[in-house]
Amino acid sequence: MMAPCVVSLLAQLLLLLHHFLPLALSLLHPPVHANVHVPTLVPHAPTPLGRSRFSAQAHLDFTTRCNASCFHRGERQLSDGLAFETLYADGFRTLTTVDVEGDDEEEEEGGEAGRSGHPSPRRPKVRRTKRQIYGADGRFNIKGDNFLLDYPFSTAVRISTGCTGVLVSQRHVLTAAHCVHDGKDYVHGARKLRVGFLIPPSINGTHSDSVSDRKPLVRWVRVKRTRVPKGWIQGPQEASMDFDYALLELRWPHRRPFMRLSVAPSSDDLAGNRIHFSGFDSDRPGELVYRFCPVEEESRNLIYQHCDARPGASGSGVYGRVWDDDLERWERKVIGIFSGHQWLEIDGENRDYNVAVRITPLKFAQICYWVHGNRPDCRQH
């Protein structure tokens, strides 16, 4: 076990990396890629569904299996799942069906969104034991005011059902669908769903000499409404992870910075080919845990990686440094939502990965509509 002073030094180095890496990246040439076409979501009038029973139990350890068929599934095949349920604070639900306009330019097979094809051949994994920590544990606990309240760590929030979420507007939190709904019904804890904001001990009047030994407190805010894609609710088990995301709207706005969304680019267009996310892993209660790792594989709908994670990290906003043409610089943007673990079977080989749901053009249009409500604002930034 590393000494506390070593852990503190590593945390400081991470913070320096977050601050100075953009400057180093700005010296690099921006990636050359075609503009992403984002279709328009046209919602129909909501249909009342009655009140939820909240009969499901929350399971933070979400695992699926996938074969070549689901790995190569295109986004068009999933467009029917863009209809969505809205759950209100009183338990009442509505279903909103949608049409998709401007989808003619969607990527064809082998296009940019799925140009990775399928995973490159690797040695078959004989062990079938599910792993969430790969080799040495590469996670870092984030402590202290300068870290917990500093962007991007400050965008991570707790979900009262035991998961993590990421702030994507002044009133909205993106998380994993399985944190609030098991595919059949809303989980019991979604009846009075809340979002927790970390408050460092020093802000609560704790004496400075004992701050480092105390866990941060949590300020809870009630959720006004929850939106879950229909693809998660009705999809077959192998497709469920493709729709494992939900949006929570808070009762009142927060004052913290949030992270902007982006259509997930090819991993080749991510700075360093790396993704990052911070979450509340269950084996480190009360701590915010940060990690980063390279993208191992990517399909049209999922990001495969070996970032160390434990249950509780589900719903974390997976972000990367994406080139922003308007700002002419590299920006951290949410490109996915950490979902869980998947066994991927390709050509007779079984490979295990930790998996994030990829924000595709259709999903970007849907989430943007949930956030802004008016379609003209829902464009790729």
Image: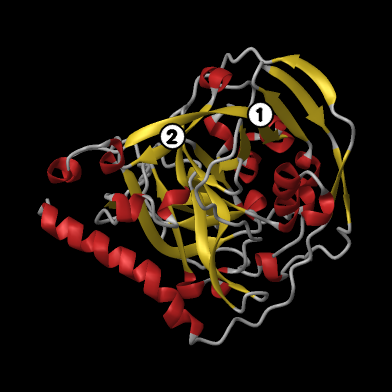
Residue 308, visible in the rendered structure? no
Is residue 108 shown left or right of residue 268?
A: right
- SS at badge 2: loop
Q: Nearer the viewer, mark 2 or mark 1?
A: 1
Residue type of the residue flagged with mark 2: Asp
Q: Amino acid at mark 1?
A: Arg
Residue 378 seen: yes
Residue at 42% over, 57% down: 124
3D distance between C-alphas at marks 2 and 1: 24 Å
At 53% from the left and 40% from the top, the residue drawn is 64
Local crowd at mark 1 within 10 Å, few (<14), some, or many (≥20)?
many
| Mark 2–mark 1 CB contact (< 8 Å) | no
Residue 50: x and y, percent?
Answer: 76, 14
Instruction: Compare marks 2 and 1 and give the one earlier in the sequence.
Output: 2
Q: Secondary structure at mark 1?
A: strand
Point out the residue furthest to the front here.
205
Query: Measured from the top left, where is residue 123 in percent x and y?
Result: 40, 63
Marks counted in the figure total 2
From the viewer's perspective, is residue 114 above or below residue 163?
Answer: below
For residue 225, which numbered disc appears in the image? 1
- The residue at which mark 2 appears reads as 61
Using the image as rendered, state which of residue 303 and residue 34 is in the foreground: 34
Q: How is the image coloured?
A: secondary structure
Residue sitting at x 68%, y 56%? 360
- Callout 2 environment at 10 Å: few (<14), some (14 to 19), or many (20+)? some
Q: Horizontally, is 284 left or right of 323 in the view? A: left
Compared with 240, 336 (above or below) is below
How far across and how far down the image is residue 165, in percent?
A: 50, 41
Q: Position of residue 268 (x, y in %)?
A: 55, 74
* 258 vs 114, nearest the viewer: 258
Residue 129 vs 375, above or below: the answer is above
